[in-house]
Image: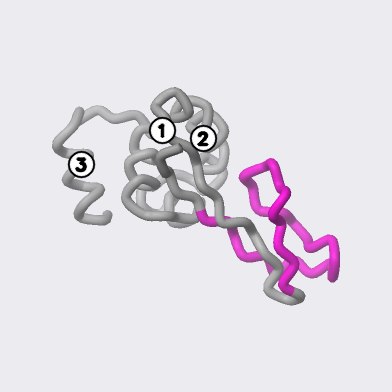
Amino acid sequence: MNKDVQDRMNASDKQLTTREKIIHCLEAAPMTARDLSKELRISEKDAYAHLPSIEKSIKHQGKQIKTIPCYCLSCGFVFKDRKSFKKPGKCPECRQSRIEAAVFGVVPD
């Protein structure tokens, strides 16, 4: 785990929820859902499932989730208007499934 993230987690409450841990990680550095799953030892599916709730809860703190969108590795198509946090299955342009995952970070409004 990133030393800065570890220090922040240890300095605060010992019993942080999974969502609080995700927020701490995303504030420290931008990450993909796979990075989060490895860092926090949760499934990638769980990491994606927490993001919509995190987005709503941090809005009240004057923060937002900044997303670098998914893109196709074959043709370069960028999924910039995508509402869902999950990685798409196929590219609508070339129909390939070589999609690079989105990167998420928590930033002030």
Q: Which of pointers 3 and 2 lies earlier in the amino acid sequence?
A: 3
Give the secondary structure at mark 1: helix
| Dots 1, 2 in contact, CB < 8 A | yes
The residue to which callout 2 is attached is: 50
The percent coordinates of residue 99 (x first, y second) are 67, 65
Q: Main secondary structure of the magenta part?
A: loop
How many angstroms separate mark 3 from mark 2 (CA)? Answer: 20 Å
User: Is 93 situated above or below 81?
Assistant: below
Give the secondary structure at mark 3: helix
Q: Which of pointers 3 and 1 lies earlier in the amino acid sequence?
A: 3
Q: Which of pointers 1 and 2 lies earlier in the amino acid sequence?
A: 1
Q: Nearer the viewer, mark 3 or mark 1?
A: 3
Highlighted range, magenta: 76-103
The residue to which callout 3 is attached is: 8
92 to the left or right of 13: right
The percent coordinates of residue 96 (x first, y second) are 79, 69
